[in-house]
Amino acid sequence: MSVSELGTPRTGSRPHQDVTIEVRGLRMRYGPVDVLNGVEFRAYRGEVVALLGPNGAGKTTTIEILEGFRIRSAGEVRVLGVDPARGGESWRARLGVVLQSWRDHGKWQVRELLRHLGSFYAPYSTAERGRPWDTDELIAAVGLTEHADKRVSRLSGGQRRRLDVAVGIVGKPEVLFLDEPTAGFDPHSRRDFHDLVHRLADLDDTTILLTTHDLDEADKLADRILVLAGGSIIADDSPDALARRMSTGAEVRWTRDGERFVHSTTDATAFVRGLFAEHGDTVADLEVRRASLEDTYLALVHEFESGHGDAVIRSFEEAAR
Amino acid sequence: MNPTWNAIRSGLERGVIELRQTFTTAQDLWGYLFPAVVLLVVMTVMRDSEVPGTGFSLGAMALPSVLGMNVAYGGLVNIAQHLAVEREDGTLLRAKAVPGGMLGYLVGKIVGIAGAVLVSLVLVLVPGMFLFDGLALTGVGTWLGLLGVVALGLVATMPIGAALGSLFPNARSIGLLFLPIIGLIAISGIFYPVTSYPEWIQWIAQAFPIYWLGLGMRSALLPEALVAAEIGESWRHLETLAALGAWAVVGLAVAPIVLRRMARRESGSSVAARREKALQRVA
């Protein structure tokens, strides 16, 4: 199943009613330490947003505040127009949360569990959005059809993660949160998962906010990347724009008479033109590699950390005191 | 459909599914059969001893008391165990992420545990009816009394059990509950009439629901003459109702507060942290 070609480019400004997540001045303080220190961002209907950042930057904390599972210290947060700290059951019905399961519901069969959890969403069904998702269709969408009658305890790690995703989307959410969704996926499952995410965003207009450590995945999935470091968002842009903004360099590789060459340059086009002018047809296996999202990300975080190193150390000393 | 009713209905369904699962899981079947067999063997051994001053079989007296004990054990320990395990493994967090999920979870737990308690009663009562003579099992009043005591007993113990399960930090620490419970069973007149103990022990026993559940069951299933072995030579129906009712009121007042506080603290990272810890212990 491949529906990724249905994706439409998302550019330009978007109408305000399409805002599904709005975060302003979000702060989270644990004891004397500010984990989040003025986080600001928005997400729109049908948008896939990847939240990146070093370990301990507060990605999980941010997501849990948006899910309504954690109470923030300060700032304004709206998810589907509602403050998550005060969200009721009808608000909850419009959200999906993909949790990392461990061994819960081990005795349940896959189909039985999804049908049961889905039944809670039935009163919240609307004309545009029929809830819950049809159980067998949902099982097929996450690729568990063969295992539908298995007990959950008999699923492999990867199958279990697919079930987690199915549980997260069984209520046809308008906003879906995924914390490290593909940890433990094999490449095939990962590809299927990416197709599913695109389908949810494009066909069902679901806003998807995910955290990941896999930058390649963020690059493929996300319409927009947020980089969280030092308690605030230090970058907020499309993967392409981010790469363009940060990278001035590229790496050019080629072979000539069976010998391999690598050259780093700030102007790859001019360099390649010169290369052909000089060596003509003897140049083979030409490859120009622009900075990847990974390079961009590492550069961003490095730049941030070296710029704010003093502040980081100071706050650490204060915490230790 | 009204979302609250829908959640309750889903919860009822959840309880029935979970109860059914216990019949096809080896570990759960063992959990039903092993205690039943042990209890029946113990009572059979006691069959030829007499309740002091009555000439009635001590084994037959113990049968209704054991039924009362099973209700208390199911309502206190089993539900506490389930809550602690399912908080640790993320079942509760899943319920929290679903609209009306916590209500459905609790309804399901009540139905599932109540069903399991009934199964454990049948497993002791039915063979017991053939093993022991002299039980008063014929009248409609007997069975209504038995069901009434079961229902009141579950209402009196389950909220307390749920609150205890929310207070323990993890599933393993629930083991700490066993010792005091076994001590209470020993002094609550389950296997030997409470009137043979010193008075101060009788007072302690009467502060807890296990004694009253045993008494209620004896009053339903034993012939009238056995009242001679009870405190005050009376079945004390009103006192039973008052004592179990008081436990129910305290439980129903405290449990929602404790449960809500516990549920509020659940999040993906708290489950992940406990998973880490548990896995470290295994390694």
Image (cartoon, grey):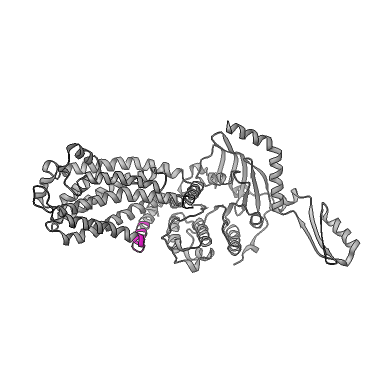
Residue ID at (21%, 40%): B206
Q: Which residues are magenta?
A: B14-27
Q: Residue A171 placed where, x, y %? A: 49, 56
Q: Residue B229 placed where, x, y %? A: 12, 46
Above or below A202: residue A235: above
Residue ID at (32%, 60%): B30
Q: Residue furthest right?
A: A278
Front-lying residue, B103 or A270 = A270
Front-lying residue, A285 or B92 = A285
Q: Is residue B24 magenta?
A: yes
Q: Residue B147 placed where, x, y %? A: 22, 53
Above or below B52: residue A29: above
Q: Residue furthest top?
A: A321
Front-lying residue, B118 or B279 = B279
Q: Residue B212 placed where, x, y %? A: 21, 45
Counting labels gives 0
Magenta: main secondary structure: helix
User: Horizontal placement of A172 versus A7: left or right?
Assistant: left
Residue ID at (10%, 50%): B224
User: Horizontal placement of B158 versus B46: left or right?
Assistant: right
Above or below A92: residue B17: below
User: Horizontal placement of B132 versus B160: left or right?
Assistant: left
Q: Tell me the quadrant of the picture where the N terminus of chain B can be found.
A: bottom left
Q: Is residue B115 magenta?
A: no
Q: Residue furthest bottom?
A: A146
